[in-house]
Image (cartoon, rainbow, N blue to C red):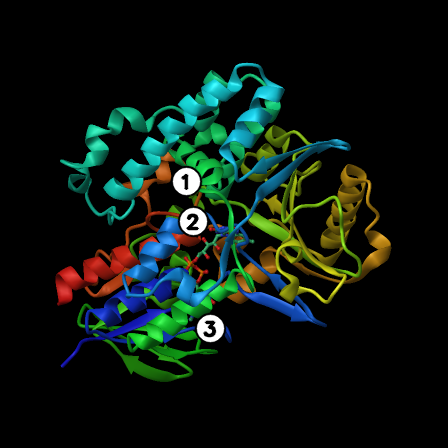
Amino acid sequence: MSKKVVVIGAGFAGLSAATYLAKQGFEVAVFEKLEKAGGRAQVFEKDGFRFDMGPSWYWMPDVFENYFNDFDCKVDQLYDLIKLEISYRVFFNYNDSIDISSEWSEIENVFESIETGSSKKLNTFINAAQQKYEIAIEGFIEKSGLSLLEFVNMKSLTGAFHLDLFKSVKKLVASHFQHPKLRSILEFPVLFLGAMPQNIPALYTLMNYADLKLGTWYPMGGMSVIADSMVEVAKMQGVKFQYKAVVQEIVVKNNKAVGVVVDQKMHSADVIIGAADYHHVEQYLLPENFRNYTKSYWDSRVMAPSALLFYIAIKKKLNSLEHHNLFFDEDFEVHGREIYDSPKWPSRPQMYVSVASKTDPTIAPKGCEALVGLIPVAVGLIDTPEIREMYLNKLIKKIERLTGEDIESDIVFVKNYAQNDFVIDYNAFKGNAYGLANTLKQTAILKPKIKNAKLHNLFYTGQLTVPGPGVPPALISGKIVAKEIVKIFL
Ligand SMILES: Cc1cc2nc3c(=O)[nH]c(=O)nc-3n(C[C@H](O)[C@H](O)[C@H](O)COP(=O)(O)OP(=O)(O)OC[C@H]3O[C@@H](n4cnc5c(N)ncnc54)[C@H](O)[C@@H]3O)c2cc1C
C-alpha cells in the first residue's frame, strides 16, 4: 500500500514537494489555509482590475521549465510566457532614468554611456556571474543542506575559487565599477535575497546573470497562473487538495508524527511536510520537545524585510512607467539601516512600482492601469492604518515627482497590504515577506534544516529553509525535500 504524505500549505514549495512525491507513488494530501494555492502569490481582483499581491518578477525561466519537464509538461503548454523587451526602468530623479533592455548590446551601451570602459568590465563581471550561476544550479542549489559532506567532490568545490563566498556583493561590484548608478543596478538583484549587498556573499552575483542575461519574463494573466498550472500538474499526478483547511496541530505518538488536525478532525500520515512558514510549523503546530529550534533561535535570525504594498487602480494609461520600475532616488544605505540595523518605518524609502497592465491587457479595464507599489520595510514594526496612508501619499508623490505624470486624480481605488496581513494570511513570522536573509551565516547548511531531528518522518520546505527565498528556490526546495523523503521511505 502506498505511503500517505500530508503537506501543510500550498505555496510553491508545498506544491512542488507534493507533486514530486505523488509522481513517486505516494498518496499525497495538501491542506491549505487559504481559498487558493500559490501561497504568497495570491491575487486581488476588483472591478475588472487584477493585481498580483506578492511576487511579480519572473526570473530564472530555466528553473520553471525544468520543473514542468520533470512531469512531462512544457511551460508553453501551460501558460503564455513572454520576455519583456525592457526588463525594468530605473528612476534616479526627474528626467533621469535608464532602461535595462533584454538586448545585451543595449545594456553594454547604457553602461558605456555612464562610465567609459565599463562595458568591457561588465562582460568580465557577467561571465564570472554566469559561472557562479552554473555552478550553483548544477552543483549545490539542490543540496539538502543536511551535511557538509554533500559539498565534497562536487563541481562547486572545484569551482569554489570562483564562488567568492567570503567577499561581499558590494565589494565585488565596487571593484569593477565606480559610478553609483551602475553600482546600484548591479546591487539591486540581491535585495530579493533579503539582505544588504555588503552582507551577502558575492556568490549571489549569480543573480546579475539571471537579471541581465536570462532576462525578465511575464506569464500572461499574472504570477498566479504559475501556481494554477502547478496545481493542474499536481492533480494529474494524483495529489488531493483541501482549501480553507487550517492545520491546527501535528500529532505525535511514540516519537512519530502520526497526522495533522484540521477542523478538529485527525488526518493520519506516514510522512508530514511543513510547507507553511517554518517558524509557524515548529512553534505553533508541534509540541515543544519535538521542535528543531527554540524561540530564542528564531529571535536571533536576521529576517528578510517585510513589505508595504499598495494595489492601485488607475483610470488612465500611464506613459512614463514601464512594467517594472525601480525608484532609486534615495540613499539605500539609510533605508537599509532602517530595515536591518535600527528597525523603524523608513524615513526616505526606495520604492518599486509594477504596472503589469502595460504588458497584459487582461488585468485592467480598457484604458486603465493596475499599479502595484512596494516599499521594503523592517519586520516586526507597529503597523497602523495611519502609517500605511502616510506611505501611500509618499508613494504617489514620488511617482508624480519622478515621472512628471499626475496619477492622484485618476485613482479609482487603493487596497493596502502590510505585515499584519502577512501574519494573518500566511502565519508569517514577524510579518516577513521573503523569509530569512541570505547572509553567509544563514546560507546552505546554516539554514533551518529540512528534516526534524527528533521525528524521523517530519520535514520542512519553503523559503525559510534551503535554498532560500524566491519562487524558483521554492520550487527547488520542494524537490529537495521530496528527494530526501524518497531516499528514506521508498
Ligand atoms: C510582496 C512579495 C514580493 C515578492 N516578489 C518576488 C518576486 O518578484 N519574484 C520571486 O521569485 N519571489 C518573490 N517573492 C518571494 C516569493 O513569493 C516567496 O519566496 C515564495 O512564494 C515562498 O513560497 P513558499 O511556498 O515557501 O511559502 P508561502 O508562499 O508562504 O506558502 C505557504 C502556504 O502555507 C499556508 N499556511 C500557513 N499556515 C498554514 C496552516 N496552519 N495550515 C495550512 N496552511 C497554512 C499559507 O497560507 C501559504 O499558502 C515575493 C514575496 C512577497 C511577499
Q: Secondary structure at mark 3?
A: loop
User: What's the amino acid at mark 2?
Assistant: Pro
Q: Which residue corresponds to mark 3? A: 33
Horizontal and vertical percent for residue 162? Answer: 30, 26
Residue at x 49%, y 51% (from the top left corner): 58
Residue at x 40%, y 66% (from the top left corner): 77
The disc, 1 or 2, on the residue closer to the chain's N-terminal end is 1
Q: Is residue 464 visible?
A: no
Q: CB under 8 Å between callouts 1 and 3?
A: no
Q: Which residue corresponds to mark 1? A: 438
Q: Which residue corresponds to mark 2? A: 469
Considering every residue shown, the one lying at the far top of the view is: 116
Query: Label 1, label 3: how many angstroms apart (C-alpha)?
Result: 27 Å
The disc, 1 or 3, on the residue closer to the chain's N-terminal end is 3
Horizontal and vertical percent for residue 435? Answer: 45, 50
Ligand 1 within 8 angstroms of badge 3 C-beta: yes
Above or below for 389 versus 187:
below
How packed is label 1: few (under 14 Cα within 10 Å), some, or many (20 or more)?
Answer: many
- The quadrant of the picture occupied by the N terminus is bottom left
User: What's the amino acid at mark 3?
Assistant: Lys
Ligand 1 within 8 angstroms of badge 2 C-beta: yes
Q: CB under 8 Å between callouts 1 and 2?
A: yes
Above or below for 481 versus 31:
above
Horizontal and vertical percent for residue 294? Answer: 35, 52
The disc, 3 or 2, on the residue closer to the chain's N-terminal end is 3
